[in-house]
Amino acid sequence: MIKRQQIKDLLKSTAFGTEVTVMGWVRTFRNNQFIALNDGSCMSNIQVVIDFNNLPDELLKRITTGAAVSATGNLIESLGKGQTVEIKATSVAILGDSDPEKFPLQPKKHSLEFLREIAHLRFRTNTFNAVFKVRHALAFAIHQFYNERGFVYMHTPVITASDAEGAGEMFKVTTLDFDNTPRTDDGKVDFSQDFFARATNLTVSGQLEGELAAMAFGQIYTFGPTFRAENSNTTRHLAEFWMIEPEVAFADLEDNMQLAEDMMKYVIKYALDNCKDELEFLNTRLAEEDKQKPQNERSEFSLLEKLDFCLTNDFERLTYTEAIKILKSSKPNQKKQFKYLIDEWGADLQSEHERYLVEKHFKKPVILTDYPADIKSFYMRQNEPDAEGRKTVAAMDILFPGIGEMIGGSQREERLDKLVDRMNQLDISTDELNWYLDTRRFGSAPHSGFGLGFERLVLFVTGMTNIRDVIAFPRFPKNAEF
C-alpha cells in the first residue's frame, strides 16, 4: 500500500519539492486542471494541479465531485490565492467513481433539512466535518477531565429492568413472538418465557447502577447511550442519545454543583483550544444565519463570545423559590408573553423560563437548586420543609443560554427510611429495587451525581439549532434510518 500523507499536515508543510501522495474525495474540478481534494483530516482542501495534456480524456471525465482519487506529485508553494501550498501531480488514479448526475452533494449550499435526508453523506460537508470534529473533541475532553480527577469509568447496562426516572417512557426489549405471545392465566404477557425471564427495557439512565459502583470506588462516571420512547419531535429531543453521569460518594449538593461547573468549563475550553478552525467556521456560519433573521431574533453574542462567556463567568446559584419570585414579577410574565405563565410556587419550569433567567435576567449560566419534591425523582435527598411547610429536594439544574437545562442532578437520598417512604408514596416497588436499597443498608453515605445530555452539550458548543444535526444517525419518532 502506498503511504499517503494527510492533507492537514501538508497544508502546514514547507518541504517544497518533496514527492507526496494524497488520497481523498474531489470537492471540485476546474478547467480540467485544478482538483480541490479533501480527505476528511481537516475542513480545508488541497489543490492538486494536473497537466490535462498528459492524462487520457477517459480519466479526466471520471474526476467528478465525490469521486475518490489518489494523486502523487511534488509539493510546491502555491502562486494562487487561498492556499499556501499545492501539489503538482505527476500521476492521478481513480479509486472510486461518483456519477455526477446522481451524487446529491454538488458544490453549492444545501439546507440542513435536505442534509438530514442524506445523513449517510452529510459528513462530507464542511458543516458536518466541523460538528463531528467538535463532538469528538468534547467526548475526549470528558474522559480526560474525569481521568485527571481519579474517577473510574463504568459501563452500566443498556438493557435494564429498572426505570431510573420513573417516567415509564421506555423501549421494551423482548424476543417473544408478537403473533403468538404467551399469556398468563389473567391474560397478561408471560415474560417468564422471554429471553431474560422478566420484562426488560432499554435504559434511560445509568444512574442507579452508577450509585452502586460509587459506593465502592468513591467516584465513578458513565458515558453511554440512553433511550427514551417519548413521542416528541422538538429540536431538543432524541429517542437515542448519550449521557455522562458521574456519581460521587461523600459529596453533598455544593460539591456536585462545583464538579458540574468545573467539568463544563474544562470541556468548553478544550474545544476552544483544540478546534479553532472548526469553531471559527461554525462561528461564521452562525453569523451568516443570524443576518437572515429579524433584528429582535438575532443572537446577542456570536458563538465564540457565547463560549467565552461561559468560561469567564461564575455560574449564578439560586434556589427554585428565588427563581419563582423573579419569574413571577418578570415583564414577560406580567405582560403574559410567556406561553406558560408562572402564577404559583410548585410550577415545573419550562425552557422559556430557564432561558429568561440565563439570557435576560442574570446574563450568565445559572444553577437552580432545591426544587419542589413533587416534580422531582424519588431518589433525591429530601430537605427539611421550609418556613411555609413546603417540601423540597436537594436537586440542581444547570441552565445555559440558547439551550435551557443542560445538566440535571441532585444529592441522593442516603437515608433508608426516607427513601423507602418516598418510593411507597410513588408506588415504586421496593422489591424490584431491593438491590438498590442495599446501598442504603450497608455502609450508606452521603453521595451526589448528575446527568449531562451529551448532544445538548454538542448543540451548545457548535451553535447548531437542531439536536438531530449533532448526532451521526438521529433516532426520533417515525424515523430509524441507516
Image (spheres, rainbow, N blue to C red):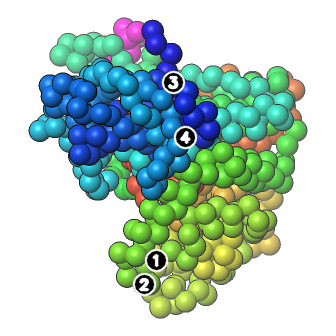
Type of amino acid under label 3: Glu
Among the two numbered marks 4 and 3 on one chain, the one whose residue lies closer to the N terminus: 4
Name the quarter where the N terminus is drawn: top left
Residue 19: numbered disc: 3
When the figure is inspected, residue 177 is found, relative to residue 346, above or below; the finding is above
Q: At which x and y percent is residue 209? A: 66, 27
Disc marking residue 207: none
Q: Which residue is mark 4?
A: 11
Callout 3: helix, strand or loop?
Answer: strand
Q: Residues within 10 Å of mark 2 (few under 14, many from 20)?
A: few
Instruction: Name the front one of labels 1 and 3.
Output: 3
Amino acid under disc 4: Leu
- Determine the image quadrant of residue 387: bottom right
Disc 1 versus disc 3: distance between alpha carbons?
A: 49 Å
Closer to the camera, 373 or 420?
A: 373
Closer to the camera: disc 4 or disc 3?
3
Please state which amino acid type lies under the numbered disc 1. Answer: Arg
Label 1 with label 2: CB-CB less than 8 Å: yes
Which numbered marker is on residue 295? 2
Three-letter code for the amino acid on which mark 2 is drawn:
Gln
Read off the residue under disc 1: 298
Query: At x 78% / y 51%, what residue is drawn?
Result: 262
In the image, the segment drawn in magenta is 188-196
Please tell me whether mark 4 sits on a helix, a strand or a loop.
loop
Q: Are marks 1 and 3 in contact (CB under 8 Å)?
A: no
